[in-house]
Amino acid sequence: MSFHIVTADSQSHWDAIVPIGGWIAAQNQPPGIPNERWAQNISVTWYGSGDAMADAIAGGLNPPNNRARVMIDELRGNSIQIVADCARAMRTRYPQFAGRWGCYLVNGTGIAYTGLQPAIDELLDARAMIACEFYAHQSDYQKAGDTAGERDTWLGDFFRGSRGSFPQGRLHWLVQRRKSRGSDSHISALFGVTDKFIGDWTFLDRMFYVFVNKSGYRGLLLADNGGAGSWKWDREGMSSSSRDVRFADAWRWYCQQEKTSLSPR
């Protein structure tokens, strides 16, 4: 499944997301979202050690809390050790929760997953869910080429990595690493949806279109895998309260109906 990260009190900006696939993710349980749809986000900054974070994850998944999922926010350069230690503790002390917890991977055009490998390997060995933050800026996309084809190639490489403008290990490397570790960790992708990333809804649609056609990993975006996730539905960061409707329309077209052509919108 995928993750839709929301601000609980901004429900008018994300209510259209609820009927589509994925977990509604937030630090606190949003009103009206039952436990079975809520993924609790926890921060690496809240804990003094990986063992303490693992205990907190297990506590959230155990009765009486019964969170559907717990996700660590996030694996980045300065959290490698604590995430690795937490994943190791989850594998050895709480193996019954494999597949019910996971971690977001940091966004950025310069990010190379190979630099996060010690923690990624531990996450894969623990069968953790891994959610890749792919928050492309529309302004970067527009500057990436003179034609739509050139810009789409840039965006496809941004997702995939290991080629073109992004020769570093990214999604392709991660999927291959999962295979080499013999892991069945669930991998999903999140798109950035705030004004910081999206200038207009056409780029929102374009991200879906390019991912399914040019990332090489279309299957990750299909509904059977949870479809695309999103970050984040927050009225303070959005000029439009209907962007969730546009996202849901694109999700149904590319993820649920499995289309590879541009949506009719």
Image (spheres, rainbow, N blue to C red):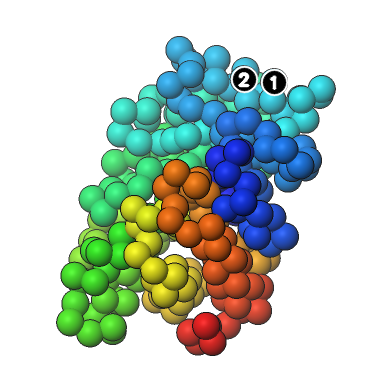
The disc label shown at residue 56, or none: 2
Q: What residue type is labelled 2?
A: Ala
The disc label shown at residue 97, or none: none
* Residue under the image location 59 percent in, 66 percent down: 245
Q: Position of residue 218 (x, y in %)?
A: 51, 72
Quadrant that contains the N terminus: bottom right
Q: Position of residue 254 (x, y in %)?
A: 57, 75
* Residue under the image location 32 percent in, 77 percent down: 152
Would residue 156 be found to the left or right of residue 53 on screen? left
Which secondary structure, mark 1?
helix
The disc label shown at residue 59, or none: 1
Q: Which amino acid does label 1 sit on?
A: Gly
Question: In which quarter of the view is residue 219 placed?
Answer: bottom right
* Residue under the image location 38 percent in, 43 percent down: 106
Q: Which of 166 and 154 is in front in this view?
A: 154
Q: Nearer the viewer, residue 224 or 155?
A: 155
Labels 1 and 2 touching (C-beta < 8 A): yes
